[in-house]
Image (cartoon, coloured by chain):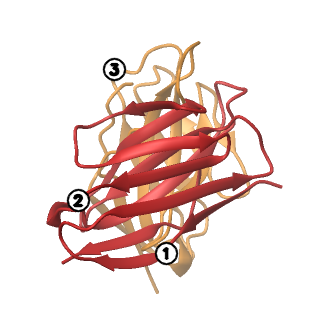
Chain colours: A red, B orange
Amino acid sequence: SQTIHQWPATLVQPVGSPLSLECTVEGTSNPNLYWYRQAAGRGLQLLFYSVGIGQISSEVPQNLSASRPQDRQFILSSKKLLLSDSGFYLCAWKSGRVNTGELFFGEGSRLTVL
Amino acid sequence: DAKTTQPPSMDCAEGRAANLPCNHSTISGNEYVYWYRQIHSQGPQYIIHGLKNNETNEMASLIITEDRKSSTLILPHATLRDTAVYYCIVRFHGSGNTGKLIFGQGTTLQVKP
C-alpha cells in the first residue's frame, strides 16, 4: 500500500533562518506531488506541484522554493524565513497515471517563525 | 476550474443526517465535483467525487442536480468525529490536467451531542 511521510512534524525557527521540509511517498512510482500551506485561520493554499523529477510549478510568488531530486521525494525550502511563512504545511500525492483519482495528504508540518 | 460556494458553517445533531450544500453554477462538462474534509490539525481526507450521477460510498452520499450547478454531500448518521471543515471542489479531468486541487473556505460542520 502507498504511504506518505512528512518531517519534521513541528519546528520553531527564527526569522532569517533557512528551512527544509521533506516529503517522501512509498508504494507508488511517478506520482504527482504537491505542497500546500495553511496559515492560522485560513484556507489551504497550493504552493507548488510537480509531475516529474526536476519539474516544479509554482502557484504563488513567495519566499519559498521546492525541489524534486528523486521520483518520490519532494522538498520545500527557504533561504531566509519570514514571519509570514508560519503555518501548517501539507504534502500530498496523486497517481500520475490517471486523470481522475484523489489526493492523499501527509500529516503536516507545523512551522512557527519567531 | 469552476468556483464553488459553500455556507461558512452548519450545525447538526449527533445521529442525524448532515446535508452540506455546494453551488458550482459555472461547472463545465468535464469537471468533476470532489468533497474533502479536514479535521482540526490534520491533512484533508478524501470523501467522495462524482460527475453527474449520484454516488455513495461507506462515508457519504453525493447528490448532484440534473443541471450540475449544485450538489449536496450527505453524511447519513453524523457522529461527533464528523466535526470538521468540508470542502467542495470542482476539478478538470481532461488531458494535461495536473490533478491539483484548489481549496476554498469550506463549510465548518459542528456535530453536537
Is residue B101 something that shows in the picture? no
* Element at label 2: loop
* Element at label 3: loop
Q: Amino acid at mark 1?
A: Ala
Determine which of the numbered discs, if any, sits on residue A9 in the image: 1
Distance (Cα) linking label 1 and label 2: 20 Å
Q: Position of residue B45 (x, y in %)?
A: 57, 57
Based on the displayed image, in which of its 4 quarters is residue B50 positioned?
Answer: top right
Local packing at callout 1 (Cα closer than 10 Å; few below 14, some 14-19, many 20+) is some
Which chain does the numbered disc 2 sit on? A
Determine which of the numbered discs, if any, sits on residue A80 in the image: 2
Distance (Cα) linking label 3 and label 2: 41 Å
Q: Foreground: B81 or A21?
A: A21
Determine which of the numbered discs, if any, sits on residue B112 in the image: none
Distance (Cα) linking label 3 and label 1: 38 Å
**Residue at label 3?**
B26
